[in-house]
Amino acid sequence: MEVKVGIVGCGVVGTGTVALLLENAKVIEEKTSIRLSISKVADKDWSRPREYEVPSTLRTTDYIEVIESSDIVVELVGGKDFAKRLLLEAIEKGKYVVTANKHLLAEDGEEIFKKAKEKGLMVGFEASVGGGIPIIKALREGLVGNRVQNIYGILNGTTNYILTQMLEQDVSFDTALKRAQELGYAEADPSLDIDGWDSAHKITLLALVGFGKLFPFEEVYVEGIRNIDLLDVELGKDLGYTLKLLAIAKRMDSEVELRVHPTFIPSDNPLAKVSDVYNAILVEGDFVGKTMFYGRGAGSRPTASAVVSDIVDIAKSMGSCKSQSWLWESKEELRINKNFYSRYYLRFDVPDRPGVLAKIANVLAEYQISIASVLQKEKVCKVAGREGQPIVPLVILTHKAYEMDMQKAIREIQQLPVVEGKPTIIRVEEEAY
């Protein structure tokens, strides 16, 4: 059986996909009895240097030529507008599609999935989350017998590298970011990564596969690592925690928490050991319990591996009715719960004198927030405060509290005369393993 594959976009991932399909064609055929052949590869600029030389007979600048000549169309352009038009045009013409475009699917995927369902076609998006980690397939097939309860993910290699540098090399956020850019791990404008949007797109798609609903992206709580202070990384380490940008999807009956933010997790947690640019996803199901998936979250070859995985799955199913099982829709009325329930790490810059803790504790108590432990670093002294006294960091770890209560309490505490500047608030997840 021969299946023709067309690719639109020949950047890093596109080039890797072409290389894999050409170099490992015999391997794939031996394993599957399917001969995958590249029909055409479209790119607007073939003068750019690439790690792999695409044969001139396969090149085109016309994406329509790719659609017309292929059974499966692979979109690796990125962005939203053109990519969306390309996918919808391909589906309208009866073509199966594969994409790595988490941005598009998380924000505008409903129209694409609906159109594909109407046509009885599949949308493959394994490469949109976790690079070479086969997490979509694991959720869709390996854990199909489970009711997925929780998903925790370190889903962005750039931010994980930065936080690893801060933890292990004792460098500031700015220094760690500069190192990431020098190594090619971060873009010149790293906003999508460091502000949490990339991870938010990915956890939205994981929730789609795990819970059976594409939640409105604007309802996802997103907070990045741009304002993380090295002091908090160090104090957290003293308390037995490691800081990660964690993407979280939790289900409790008909409510789902969907959030991305800096999170302290116990340093003996397997997720805390995931360093540098690696990704990891922990999934908890009602029967399987907790399972963890680990690997390279980006890069030409790992992501190409995920793209080809979708191509092969689609090729195996072409002409059958299997497409309906790829993306299930929950019959339950699920909704986002923004008032999540969590433990908190709080740091206040306060004068080193009696009575300060009592004032802060009184406000927390008003909102039913219980203190678990307190840490005050007398040797970590900042410049003198408003009354000329030394300013020291006061760290409070709380028991579980509701997010809305915590935000109200923090706003009130910030107005206290004994608190200098803006308090630091970092959520703590003890149950991530």
Image: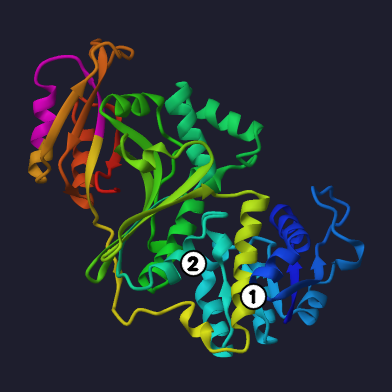
Name the image quarter holding residue 4. bottom right
Above or below 245: residue 228: above
> Are the residues at dot 2 and dot 1 in contact (C-beta closer than 8 Å)?
no
Residue 63: in magenta span? no
Residue 353: in magenta span? yes
Residue beneath the point at 88% across and 61% down:
55
Name the image quarter holding residue 220. bottom left
Left or right of 137? Residue 392 is left
Magenta-tinted stretch: 346-362
Say whether residue 49 is visible: yes
Say whether residue 82 is visible: no
Q: Residues within 10 Å of mark 2 (few under 14, many from 20)?
A: many
Name which residue type carries label 2.
Lys
Residue ranking furthest to the right: 56
Q: Secondary structure at mark 1?
A: strand
Q: CA distance from mark 2 to mark 1?
A: 16 Å
Name which residue type carries label 1.
Val
| Residue to which mark 1 is pinned | 97
Question: In front here: 6 or 203?
Answer: 6
Which mark's residue is nearer the viewer, 2 or 1? Answer: 2
Task: Looking at the image, tell me whether mark 2 or mark 1 is earlier in sequence order.
Answer: 1
Q: Position of residue 256 (x, y in %)?
A: 29, 64
Above or below 86: residue 271: above
Q: Secondary structure at mark 2?
A: helix
Q: Position of residue 361 (x, y in %)?
A: 11, 33
| Residue to which mark 2 is pinned | 137
Residue beneath the point at 57% across and 55% down:
132
Q: Position of residue 253 (x, y in %)?
A: 22, 69
Residue beneath the point at 91% across and 67% down:
57
